[in-house]
Image (cartoon, rainbow, N blue to C red):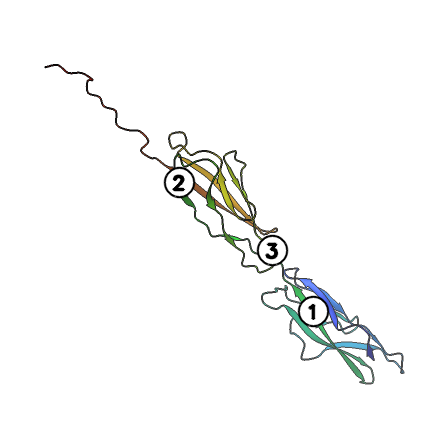
Amino acid sequence: PTVTSGGDAGSIDENSGAGQVIYTATADDSADISGGVTFSLSSASSDALSINANTGRVTLSDNPDFESADSYDFVVLASDAAGNSSEQSVSLSINNMDEIAPSITSDVAISIEENSGPGQAVYTATALDDDNTGTAITFSLQSESDALSIDKDSGVVTLSDDPDQEAQSEYSFTVVASDGVNQSTQAVTLTVNDLDEYGPVITSADSASL
């Protein structure tokens, strides 16, 4: 028999489930007296793979995980009743998917001086993405705020107010880091430091007599 199915089984996504059919072998035995073709896998094939001898369907028993195995290689054997056989080497690729949310690495508490001016950058959000899928991290604030805004690319948080400890002693906000699929959050507290703004008030009398 001549194996007519190709050597590229294509690709499947990781975590797409165990027990799926990932390839169907086909063969032609018309060049000779045919007693039918049966299929098998050579001993060099992955233990996670099995083949239906009659249909040629190859099944993957594993739930594919790119981090454990980024591909599966196997060899299909097509045999006739007389014992003649041919083989085809096949490879199945596993697609790496984004599974892990970014990890926010910036501080949870910061402080600024009161009366230090409006429009200043008060915080820079940073995050790491261990998934290595190449997707950029973007930042946002969980709740809208008139006083606070964040640059989605740099993670810089800007305070539009001129901070005044007597009016508001702290600002609380939640940073969201997203890789486009997964996201994580970090609650942050910005404390406004109270400064000595006023000189002493002299309380003694403004005149004296002798």
Name which residue lies at 56% across and 56% down.
100
The residue lying toward the viewer, choosing from 89 and 55, is 89
What's the distance in space between the residues labelled 2 and 3, CA to CA? 33 Å
Q: Earlier in the sequence, mark 2 or mark 3?
A: 2
Badge 1 crowding class, 10 Å Cα cut-off, few under 14, some 14 to 19, many 20 or more, is some
Which one is in front, 180 or 3? 180
* Picture residue at 64% right of the left edge, 66% below the top: 62
Name the kind of residue labelled 1 in the image. Answer: Leu
Q: Quadrant of residue 56?
A: bottom right
What residue does disc 3 label?
135
What secondary structure is found at the residue carrying circle 3? loop
**Label 1 sits on residue:** 92
Q: Is residue 138 left or right of residue 87?
A: left
Is label 2 or label 1 in front? 2
Could you say whether the residue bearing mark 2 is in a helix, strand or loop?
A: strand
Query: Is the residue marked by circle 2 packed among few (<14), some (14-19), or many (20+) residues within 10 Å?
Result: some
2 vs 3, front mark: 2
